[in-house]
Image: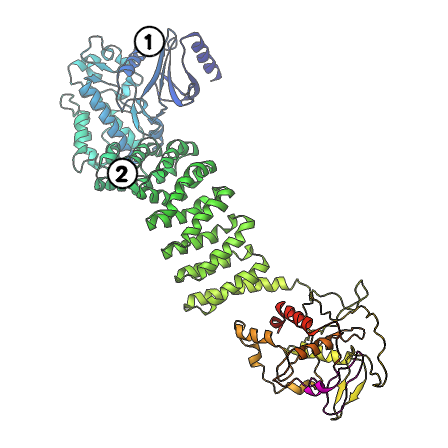
Amino acid sequence: MDFLKSAVASAISKGPAFGYSFGDRVDIDDSIWTLYNGIKREDGSKCSIFSFDVAANKSRLPLARNALRKLRTLRHPGVIKVLDTVETESYIYIATERLNPLSWQVKRKSLTEETIKWGLHNIAKTLKFINNDATSVHACIRPASIFFSESGEWKLGGFEALSSMKEDDAVLPTFGSLIPDSQRYMAPEISKGGWEIIRQNPAHAIDAYNFGTLIFECFNGSYHGSDQLGQMKSIPPSMHQMYKRLLNPNPKARMSVGQFLDQGRRVGGFFQTPLIQVTEDIESLGLKADAERDKLLSQLDDVADDFPADFFKMKVLPELLKSVEFGGGGAKVFGTVMSIGKKLTDDEYDTQITPVVVRLFANPDRAIRVCLLDNLPQMIDHLSQKLINDKIFPQMVTGFTDLAPVVREQTVKAVLIVVPKLSDRIINGELLRYLAKTANDEQPGIRTNTTICLGKIARNLGVNTRGKVLSAAFARALRDPFVHARNAALMALSATSDLFNEEDCATKILPVICPSLVDKEKTIRDQALKTMDIYLARIRKYSSTLPDTALPSPALSSTGTAAPRMGTPATDTASWAGWAISSFTNKLAAASGEIQSGTNGSTQQRPSSVPPPIPSSSKPPAPVSPPRKSGMNLSKSSTSIPTIVSPEPVNAFEDEDFGNEWGSFDDPSNKKEEEEDPWTEPAPKPTTTTTFDDQGEPDFAGWLAAQSEAKKPLKKELPKGLSKGTTNTKRPVIGGRSSTMGSATRKVVAAPKKDTPKAVKTKKNEDEEEGWGDAW
């Protein structure tokens, strides 16, 4: 083999230029030609090369030269297509379209009945042209002279003996006996009278007989001699009668191939098959009416398995694409295109279908746009990322704002298909802007599909933007009056729960889910519960990882100041207020100082912040610079509200009604009333206490006295311990004690003189503005 290739290459180098390269050799039956697969050097396209070695087959040189001359001049769709020829004294080369011998498939019996009829139909049309129009005789009809083209069509070759009976120097009468394997296929009259007798008989006689042997061999797989021709078991019954007439021993009474073709084309004839009908009509697909086109396409679907795949690629597909683009073929034709496209390689798809798809996306026809979007899942794997971003998506976005709802809806659905190949810039910019519009579309179905789309492309969104976009979009969808839109939002939230951080789950997602728990539709309520459980489970898991408290350690800080004493949360779940009571009792246990008896026999605890009593006759000591306070400071930066420890027992307010004190969280009147005067309630409120060690400075009591002074006259009774009985007493000096005569009163310590009532009032207003009322 290598030697033969080198010899051919050497011969080419010495002869005329031949722009084709020889490839592998193709084995064929007895023939004067050697067939090679070839490549055209100019464009790399595939071809076949028939090679004739003059030195090895000098006796058959007239047949080779006759074939070369006939192939150059004879043009017909059923004849092999010649690309180039070269003839020298040592060789003859004929470059043709890429071919494969029919004899391969016949010997394997791999052809279906419908495919054989389709092939015989093509050969019959070609022979009719040769016998009737060209008034010639082929004389070499057999599987070795018939080839498959790249489109799967049967093409006629073997023109070595093709002759016109009008020519005086016809090759057939003289060199007919040199045809390879001529004895096996020879007609009866030639066996008896020789090749010269063909001039006395009709021109079609020999070819009609050989066509009969071709029918037998195609359906049976082999042919050894004329004694087998009577066995018609494998031949379709509808062809039996015409088959016998082709093999009539009398050449003058023998049916011609043209007559056989006409009989087969009659209504109900053996050539009236869907496969043949499609082949006949496919070339005029763009000219057919809608009804005829639909009928043809339905037939095409029926014969898809019988047709050679290559025929769809080379013949049917180009006609379908032209019908879609220019002939108004519509969605059904394009659906057939996609079915054929599944059988194409990536290179074939890029060459034949992709350019048409790009042009169709620029077409303003809505029907074509919807058709493209419907079939986008079948095309997406063959379209490159660059092509989608640069050419297809810019045309596709016009569908988001189209007046037709069906176009908008199909465009939203198509986002799921193209988003894996879109760039991050387009996804987080242009795409989200268009989806924001469809999320507020007038059509509820489009709004619902937009929510579903956002949920499915959530992981394609940028990390920095998706939390904000998704929470806003789903929150809006949860308020949608369309029940399916709300359900889609809840399902999308369930599917994307892992994309939100725990803080967003607690502060943004759960609040918008809660109204759905009481939705009028049961499906929404059920889905809301499921979604709520997903987020609550996640928050519980996260909260278990948080520390018990964020407050500083009770140990001394670095400045040496003791940290405020805090109540320990109760572990007993039987009482929800256990932690508050525990804190209050801890405060009482930690209190220090003396217990004094009042005139009414009750006891009163001296706060630790008040210094021990001084005899009334003694003068107060000279004022000294107060030490640094570790307790409450009434400066503008103070944001904590002081608490008052009631001198009454803990059970003193068991009968109080606090229902009106909480009010509504959204009631501004309650808040305003609290801010105006949080201290004038008729009964003390249960509060937790915190001990402030102020080193003996009575600043809080002074502030309280100024507060009472500013609001004279008081219309409501002051809490116990702040009765009006103390107003007639002389204002005590710092460190002094009030009179204990009369009803039990609480000692009031005056604030420093520099704190005027006006200053105190200003300070109070500032504290109220900083949220004093809100704290209550």
Report whether 730 appears left or right of 74. right
Give the label on residue 403, or none.
none
Q: Residues within 10 Å of mark 1 (few under 14, many from 20)?
A: few
Above or below residue 602? Residue 183 is above
Q: Quadrant of residue 257?
A: top left
| Apparent side of residue 10 relative to residue 370 in the rendered image (left or right) | right
Of the 4 image quadrants, the one containing the C terminus is bottom right
Secondary-structure class at tag 1: helix
- Which residue is at the far left? 253
Q: Please report the residue visible at 38 percent of the width from the left and 22 percent of the height from the top.
A: 47
Closer to viewer: mark 1 or mark 2: 2
Q: Is residue 729 magenta?
A: yes
User: Mark 2 falls on what kind of element?
Assistant: loop
Range of magenta residues: 719-747
Residue 326 in the image, given as x and y percentages of width and height: 28, 34
Residue 20 or 560: which is nearer the viewer? 560
What residue is disc 1 on?
Answer: 59
User: What type is the residue that disc 2 sits on?
Assistant: Gly
**Front residue (pair 10, 673):** 673
Q: Residue furthest top?
A: 89
Task: Identify the disc placed on residue 328.
Answer: 2
Dominant SS in magenta? loop
The first of marks 1 and 2 along the sequence is 1
Instruction: Decide if residue 750 is in sight here.
Output: yes
